Amino acid sequence: MNPTIVRVLTRLGAGGPPIHAVLLTRELSKFGYSSILVTGSRHQQDGDMSYLLRDNDPVYSIPEMSRSVSPWQDLRALIALYRFLRRQRPQIVHTHTAKAGVLGRIAARLAGVPVLVHTFHGNVLNGYFSPPVNWAIRQVERALAYFTDGICVLAPQQASNIVDQHRIAPRGKVHVIPLGVDMTRFHETASLLNLARAVRNGGRITVGWMGRFVPIKDIPLLVAVVRETLRRTDRVRFLVAGDGPEAATVKALAAELGPERFEWLGWREDVDPILAACDVLMQTSRNEGTPMALIQGMAAGRPFVSTAAGGVVDMVTGDLWRERDGCRWFANGILAEADPAAFASAFCELTEDPSRIATMGRCGAEFANATYSLPTMLRSLDALYSTLLEKKVGAGARTSHAVSATDG
C-alpha cells in the first residue's frame, strides 16, 4: 500500500506556496505516494490561484480555515481537520504556510499521524508584526517544532534564521530543500533573441515587478524606485503585474505616468508573456523565502535587482565583482540596499551596458537549471519522507518506491 500524504495549505491565494503545494500533490505520485491537498477559503484581496488545479487533482476544502485569526473559526477548522485526518489515516501530514502549520500539525498530532513535516515559505517571524506578537509567534513555533519530525526551508539563509537567530528548532531537524520548477516552459523565453532586446533598443530596458501588493513587499519602496529612476533617465520603462490591498497606490502611479513609462497589468495567471516583455526583474520585499517570480525570471534568462531579503541572498551566483552606490553585483543579479537611489543607479548602469543584461541572464538561466530542478526537489522530499517513515513506522512503511522522474 502506498503511503498517503495529506498536504495542508491555508488558501489558494496569490503567491508561491500554492504553486509549490499543488505541484507536489500532483508530482509525488510518480514516487509511489497518494496525495490529498487540503486547503481553506480565500479573502477577496488574497487573489485566486485555484486555476492551478486540474479536474482530477485530489483536493479537500475546509472553508473554516483562512489566514485571518478568529478563535471560533480556527477551532472549527481544527476540528474539521482532525476529523478528516481520522477518516483518511495518512502516514504523513505536510503543512505549508503559518496558519496551516499551526492547525495542521496540532490536528495531525491529535489524530495520531505518524510523520509531521512543515515547510517555511519565508516566515512570519520578521517584518510582519509588532515585537510582542513576534515573541508570541516564536514561542508557538518552538512548541510546534518540538513534535514536528521534519522542518523544510527553501534556502540556507532560512535555515540559519530558523536555527540560529530564532532558535525554533535544532539543526538536525531542519532540511534545506530548494523549490523545484519545470524549466522547459521558459526555454523559449530565454532565447538569445529575447536576451538581445535591450541591445537592439539602444539600451532602453523594461523592468518587471510581479507579486502581491501587501506591506511585506514594500510597495512604497517600489513607487519610490520608479520615481527616482524615471527622474534620472528616460531609458527605463516599468511593467508591474499584481494585485492586493495596496493596489490603489500602484493604480494611481500608472494613471499619473502613463503606459509608456509605467504599466500596471493587474493580476495575471500566465507569467510567460510578462517575462518575455521584460529585460530585468525587480523585487523590493522586506522579507522573503525564495520568491518564485525570481526563479521563473532566471529560468527565462532575466537577471534581477532585489533587496537582500531572506532567501534572496542565496539566489545570486558567482563572486561579488562590484560594490558601489548601495549595490552588490553578482553574475546573475544585483542585491541593492532598500534605497530608491541604489535601485536607480543599478538600472541606469544597465542601460549604459545592455550587453551585460544578456550575460547576466545566461548565468541566471544556468543557475536556475542547476539549483531549482523539479526532479531534484521531488527526490529530496522522497528521501526525507522515506527516512522519517522508517524511523517512525518501521522498515515496512515504504512498500512501494517508484521513481520515474529524471533531470530536465
Image (spheres, rainbow, N blue to C red):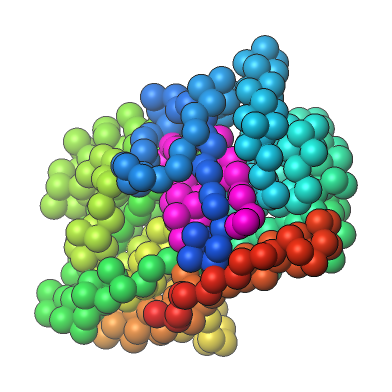
Instruction: Check the picture and name the quadrant holding the N terminus.
Output: bottom right
Q: Which residues are magenta?
A: 1-27
Q: Is residue 275 left or right of residue 115?
A: left
Given residues 53 and 253, the one toward you in this image is: 53
Q: Going 74% across and 60% down the picture, which residue do you hit?
A: 397
Given residues 6 and 49, the one toward you in this image is: 6
Instruction: Check the picture and name the quadrant holding the C terminus.
Output: bottom left
Q: Quadrant of residue 75?
A: top right
Residue 26 is inside the magenta segment:
yes
Q: Is residue 390 left or right of residue 36?
A: right
Q: Going 54% across and 71% down the picture, which residue do you hit?
A: 402
Task: Look at the picture and state if 17 lies above or below 401.
Answer: above
Residue 152: percent from left, percent from top: 68, 58
**Would residue 166 be visible to someone looking at this image?**
no
Q: Going 58% across and 45% down the picture, which residue do you hit?
A: 7
Given residues 332 and 230, the one toward you in this image is: 332
Q: Residue furthest front?
A: 1
